[in-house]
Image (tube, helix red, strand yellow):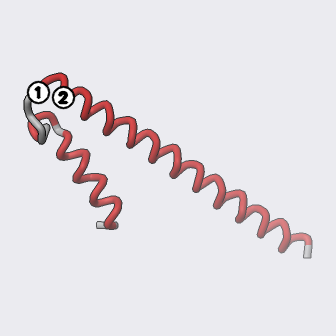
Amino acid sequence: MKALIAFIGMALVIIVLIEINERIKAKKAKGERLEAKEGCEKKNPEQEDCSGCGLVDVCEKEEKKKTGH
């Protein structure tokens, strides 16, 4: 019985650690997108799409992550 409780506790700890890791990754990705957008706006302030400096690639990667493809 103690082993079962320990196993369930360990599983919960692992799930919480995975969730924390995913949140940290999401924050980093959001920061990278903001930096890319700011850098692009500095390079080409008159352009709205920023396709020349790689922002489109960042957005496409995020779209793929959201859709699961």
| Percent of width and height locating residue 18 | 58, 55
The C terminus - image quarter: bottom left
Identify the residue at horizontal 25%, vertical 45% (top origin): 58
Q: Quadrant of the N terminus?
A: bottom right
Q: Are marks 2 and 1 in contact (CB under 8 Å)?
A: yes
Provide the secondary structure element on which disc 2 rests: helix
66 or 41, nearer to the observer: 41
Relative height, residue 37 to residue 66 (above, below): above
Label of residue 41 in the image: 2
Amino acid at dot 2: Glu
Whether 50 is drawn above or below 59: the answer is: above
In the picture of the structure, the residue carrying the numbered disc 1 is 44
User: In the current view of this chain or complex, which residue is farthest to the top?
Assistant: 42
Q: Which residue is at 91% across, 71% downward?
A: 2
Judging from the image, what secondary structure is the residue with disc 1 in? loop
- The part of the image, by quadrant, that contains residue 7 is bottom right
